[in-house]
Image: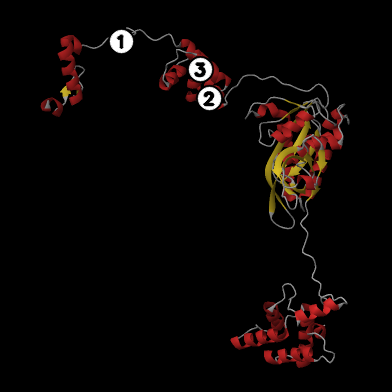
Amino acid sequence: MRERTAHATTWPDGSRKRIPRSTLHRWIQRYQSDGLAGLLPQPRQDLGQPRTGDRQHIDYAIGLLLEQPGRSLQQLDAYLRRQFGDYALSQATLRRRLRAHPAWPAVERLRTGKDHRLRDRYEAQHAHECWQLDGKGPFAVRLVAGGSVRVHVVSVLDDYSRAILAAHVAGAEDTAATISAFCKAAARYGLPGRMQFDRGAAFDSNAFRNGLAQCGVHRNYVRARYPQAQGKIEAYHRSLQRWFVDELRAQQVHDLAHLQDLLDATIALVYQQHRHRSIGMSPAQRLAGQVSSRQISAADLARAFYVSATAQSDAKTGEVQLPNGRFRVPLPYAGKRALFRCDPLAQVAVLITRDRRELALEPFLVKPLPPVDPGDVKRGSGRLQRLLDDWRGTPRANAEPAFGIPEVFQALAESLGRQVPASEQEASYVQTFWWTHGPLERTAFLRACTRAKVALGEGRPLATLLADIARQIANDNDDESPQEVLA
């Protein structure tokens, strides 16, 4: 056994390979059980005939790939096992059989996009039968104030006349920009019968698709990553690049509102008036100002694109956070979870009650802090007021907001024309002054510093300046408070 496993053996085909010890033990076991017949090669179960029973499996798999060329072997294996009960090919065998199929080159052309078949052309038969929607960008725009912004242009095109019904400048190609462009066109021309747009995230969002469905606008099916279906608006984008985007390099732009006006002027006076070769006239001539027979009010148009949200309001303030801002719910609904519908373009929202009524909500406003009353504490006549005066003793200190020792340092530094405090001794001077006369009013203290500077002149020590301010405070013959003296 050691000799056989230590050296390579020459096989009948001329190759030299070492026989493993496990193989020698298997051969010995077979010889002991079946004799010399146990060492002979076992016949194949299919008797050496080629397998032909899986031809229908491969044809079905080719059909799956022609339907969706991007399907993987794992997907094909899962679909085939659920379609055929006797399917038992491995993925490696499936791949080998697929590549040997006569229809495999067609699958490869679909996967690489090199499908040169002739296509049909589709066109609407009248104005507003079908609209196309798409976005152009992002492209950079330099502003007069400095810097640049990256913007998109979302446009709505009439399939029949090639006229641009609306063009909206936005910072991002999102759902809000898409709804804004559609609402601009619908508010002016009415509703179309159908729309066509690609599978972009903004165009395929639930908010936009649900709004179109409520308006009764059918969405044409468009395959993903297939720009040929959007040929008309893609041609408009090439014109927009040449007539507008390239011209912005030599144009001063102040802000997005100015950019929107420039875009509207370019479309109205250049694109809408140019002669379109496909229709033999300008888009404005073919549209001829026609509006759709399907009209909709501004309120119904905005309500169609409301988005639903479920949120819980605060029990104390009634505040609820919705996708378009913060609102206040009525008192009976404070602290409860409820269903809301809100406008994605404006700060408008309604609360949906259990009986399906709609309650309009007001925006939740955060109020600023109330102003500080610099006057004295209000006093009233009566015997209880005497008790209050005796209990208080002396007035309790209360500083003006954001005016303390740091602000006193800044005011003294401006009066002396140098840094204050310049030493530990000067810091001690200011602190002792504050303990003696503070807290102080900002306006009165600054006025006292100005008078001391005028009276003493330039280059005086800090202690002299503080002494003059203290003299102004002490100059009180009527028992006034330090605040009144400074004032």
> Would you place residue 114 above or below residue 208 in this image?
above
Rendered image quadrant of residue 260:
top right
Task: Indicate left or right for 337 with 109 as reference.
Answer: right
For disc 1, the marked residue is 44
Q: Secondary structure at mark 2?
A: loop
Pick whichever, 278 or 34, lies toward us: 34
Residue at the location (77% across, 79% down)?
Answer: 441
Pick whichever, 319 or 349, lies toward us: 319
Task: Indicate left or right for 245 with 359 as reference.
Answer: left
For disc 3, the marked residue is 82
Answer whether residue 272 is visible to the viewer in this image.
Answer: no
Q: Secondary structure at mark 3?
A: helix
> Would you place residue 439 above or below residue 249 in this image?
below
Residue at the location (50% across, 13% down)?
Answer: 59
**Label 3 – label 2 distance at C-alpha:** 16 Å
How many numbered callouts?
A: 3
Rendered image quadrant of residue 138:
top right
Q: Residues within 10 Å of mark 3 (few under 14, many from 20)?
A: few
Residue at the location (82% across, 90% down)?
Answer: 476
The percent coordinates of residue 350 (x first, y second) are 79, 41
- The answer to which of marks 3 and 1 sits earlier in the sequence is 1
Looking at the image, is mark 3 or mark 1 nearer the viewer?
Answer: 3
**Label 3 – label 1 distance at C-alpha:** 28 Å
- The answer to which of marks 3 and 2 sits earlier in the sequence is 2
**Label 1 – label 2 distance at C-alpha:** 34 Å
Which quadrant of the rendered structure holds the C terminus? bottom right
The percent coordinates of residue 400 (x first, y second) are 75, 75
- Numbered label attached to residue 71: 2
- The answer to which of marks 1 and 2 sits earlier in the sequence is 1
Q: Residue furthest left?
A: 3
Q: Secondary structure at mark 1?
A: loop
